[in-house]
Image (cartoon, grey):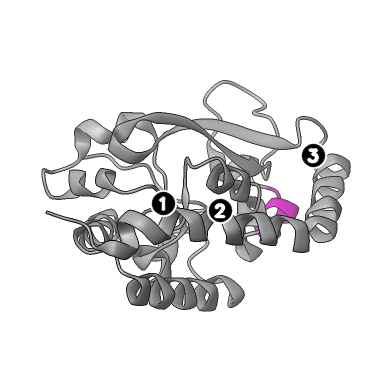
Amino acid sequence: MSDGFYARRCKRPLDALLAGSLLVLLAPLLGLATLAVRLALGRPVLFRQVRAGRDGVPFTVLKLRSMRPAAWPGEPDGARLTAFGWVLRASALDEWPQLLNVLRGEMSLVGPRPLPLDYIPLFTPRQRGRLRVRPGLMGLAVARGRNALPWAERLEWDARYAERVSLGGDCAAALGSLGVLLRGQGVHAPAHPTSPRLDG
């Protein structure tokens, strides 16, 4: 499968330009959000986790922390997610530090959401196609419901995106994602306080 001119030549420079501009533009709000996390949850302010990047190459994704520390080993995420953390997630403010991941070339503004490395063996051959592109802040799966979608549907939209990357497709996915995020939709899966793990 060959990529078009936009995917080969334009997408990465555009990502870098827009991510850098957004970091400057949003710096005051991001600073306030960082201070709020520090006051509400303490240190560390940033949550770091290794995720699968393009071609499955590991990288460290950055987020503002939205959960308190576990009170005991194995305490479920739902119990650790505070009301403040829920607001962070609903507004997607917790995802903004990933603009640094975009600027560094580990992510794109639009693409499949980055997933943990231990999910890769659980992908079907078609789902594994999502790894041929950089993961993104926004994408088709986000635009169609975010975490409210079942895993099979999320991964299918990711595979469809990776099949044909285009400027028009990226613009449509970005606008759809922004609509979902601004409405605070899809913060969690049905009957789950957060998003359930992919179980194969």
Q: Nearer the viewer, residue 28 or 46?
A: 28
Nearest to the eye among marks 3 and 2: give it: 2
User: In this view of the protein, can residue 111 be seen by the observer?
Assistant: no
Q: Tell me what residue is drawn at x 43 percent, y 64 percent.
A: 146
Q: Give, as a three-letter code, the residue at label 1.
A: Arg
Q: Secondary structure at mark 3?
A: helix
Q: Tell me what residue is drawn at x 52 percent, y 53 percent.
A: 193
Q: Which residue is mark 2?
A: 16
Q: Is residue 194 left or right of 162 when viewed as pictured?
A: right
Q: Give, as a three-letter code, the residue at label 2.
A: Ala
The numbered disc on residue 113 is 1
Disc 1: CA contacts within 10 A as few (<14), some (14-19) or many (>=20): many
Q: Tell me what residue is drawn at x 31 percent, y 69 percent.
A: 166
Tell me residue 52's x, y (percent).
Answer: 37, 35
Tell me residue 107's x, y (percent).
Answer: 47, 46
Q: Mark 2 or 1 closer to N-term?
A: 2
Q: Which residue is mark 3?
A: 41
Q: What count of labels does the image hold?
A: 3
Q: In the rendered structure, which segment of residues is drawn in magenta?
A: 82-86
Disc 3: CA contacts within 10 A as few (<14), some (14-19) or many (>=20): some
Disc 2: CA contacts within 10 A as few (<14), some (14-19) or many (>=20): many
Task: Say whether marks 3 and 2 touch (CB < 8 Å).
Answer: no
Tell me residue 25's x, y (percent).
Answer: 76, 63
